[in-house]
Image (spheres, coloured by chain):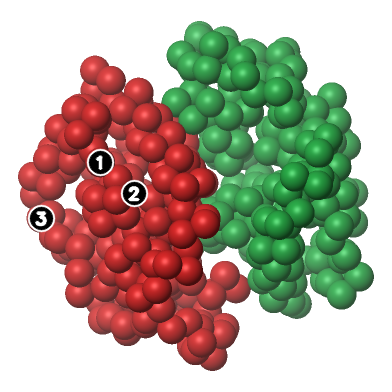
Chain colours: A red, B green
């Protein structure tokens, strides 16, 4: 199995974390998140969205979008609930992550820590910071009185939201006002088979 | 069952279209997409993301994020495949929709047709138009040689992508260069039980 991936990408990290925790072997093709000029050439036949992660199964079939890949491998394991309402709640948090969290927190992090030219994004940064803090507010409300996001058990929802939240400080976000979120981050990091972000 | 909804929102329309096609009854609470000042008061206890659609089941449990709601009602029906790879492909297109399509096409449409002040967004519009056309390019590639997005059958993926694509012209998008997408739009609109966007 082949994973087109970038070491610094939280979206790719979600997949690597899940595959590590499920003990599934794969090979990595590293792509740059800064120079994306070869994306159409490399991913054109595999992923209409031209993003990483893109996975190629052993039989050659491609799969893309980090959270969809998580479901392909996670469904049927202890990381996805069997109750229909809880399954929908996992999806609710994952769609929240891709719509309200990643475009703010991951993008601010990329601009500041990885783009090589943070000054180019100065005018747009305040909007992303506001959106990122609104997402952190929503997470803190969602974790109020809970150990994990869904059903009091570690699930794909936690993997998806952990990916960029645990490196949010690289985007200039201060998690000090978010005690429930900070405790949850530690809980996720102490799960069996946890691996850090990176190659 | 209670659906907090906005008549012009494509995200809410996804849910109304699915519930109509499945013959499920519900009541609507209409919220404005322009004046959002009462969102925390109305939705605070129901949806940490404070967005519509937000659904309250008959037993009082809330559910949010349009595509998560679709899965709650659609899974187990003819609108969700049983094959694990095809299920992941449906999710792939729905995450693509929320990340690469809606933030560009729906937002441009809102600014131009519904915000009441399109001139306020003039500086930001070109980026959203470029992103919107990139999403339409990806859809056209995804539909190449296919009748529907996944498994040659109408599924939740088609409902999710139809919602804002069929009103993309309100955001100034020209679908003329997208013949596969235009043929697919007609195919979706001719499905049994189809209802138009609106209240």
Q: Is residue A13 left or right of residue A34?
A: left
Q: Earlier in the sequence, mark 1 or mark 3?
A: 1
Nearer to us: label 2 or label 1: 1
User: What is the spatial separation of the Cα atoms under label 2 and label 1, in whole angstroms?
Assistant: 20 Å
- To which residue does mark 3 refer? A193
Residue B70 locus on image (x, y percent): 60, 37
The one of A151 and A141 positioned closer to us in this rendering = A141
Residue B197's label in the rendered image is none
Q: Residue at x 23, y 38 (%)?
A: A175
Q: Residue at x 28, y 69 (%)?
A: A8
Q: Earlier in the sequence, mark 2 or mark 1?
A: 2
The one of B132 and A105 positioned closer to us in this rendering = A105
Label 1 sits on a secondary structure element that is loop
Q: Quadrant of the N terminus of chain A?
A: bottom left
Marks 1 and 3 close (CB-CB < 8 Å): no
Is there any visible trace of residue B106 in the rendered image? Answer: no
- To which residue does mark 1 refer? A174
- To which residue does mark 2 refer? A160
Residue A144 locus on image (x, y percent): 28, 20
Label 2 sits on a secondary structure element that is helix
Q: Chain of mark 1?
A: A
Nearer to us: label 1 or label 3: 1
Q: Earlier in the sequence, mark 3 or mark 2?
A: 2
Q: Chain of mark 2?
A: A
Residue A99 locus on image (x, y percent): 51, 46
Q: Chain of mark 3?
A: A
Crowding near pointer 3: few (<14 within 10 Å), some, many (20+)?
few
Q: Residue at x 37, y 30 (%)?
A: A137
The image quarter in which residue B73 lies: top right
């Amino acid at each position: 199995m082949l994973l087109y991936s970038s070491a610094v990408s939280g979206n790719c990290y979600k997949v690597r974390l899940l595959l590590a925790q499920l003990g599934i072997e794969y090979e990595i093709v590293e792509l740059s998140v800064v120079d994306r000029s070869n994306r159409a050439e490399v991913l054109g036949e595999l992923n209409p969205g031209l993003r990483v992660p893109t996975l190629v199964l052993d039989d050659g079939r491609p799969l893309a979008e980090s959270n969809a890949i998580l479901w392909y491998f996670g469904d049927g394991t202890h990381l996805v609930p069997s109750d229909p309402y809880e399954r929908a709640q996992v999806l609710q948090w994952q769609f929240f992550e891709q719509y309200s969290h990643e475009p703010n927190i991951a993008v601010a992090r990329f601009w500041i820590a990885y783009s090589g030219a943070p000054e180019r994004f100065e005018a747009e940064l305040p909007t992303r910071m506001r959106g990122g803090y609104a997402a952190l507010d929503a997470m803190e409300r969602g974790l109020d009185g809970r150990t994990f996001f869904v059903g009091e058990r570690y699930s794909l929802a936690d993997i998806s939201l952990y990916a960029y939240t645990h490196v949010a400080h690289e985007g200039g976000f201060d998690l000090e006002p978010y005690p429930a979120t900070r405790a949850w981050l530690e809980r996720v990091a102490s799960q069996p088979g946890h691996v850090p972000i990176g190659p």
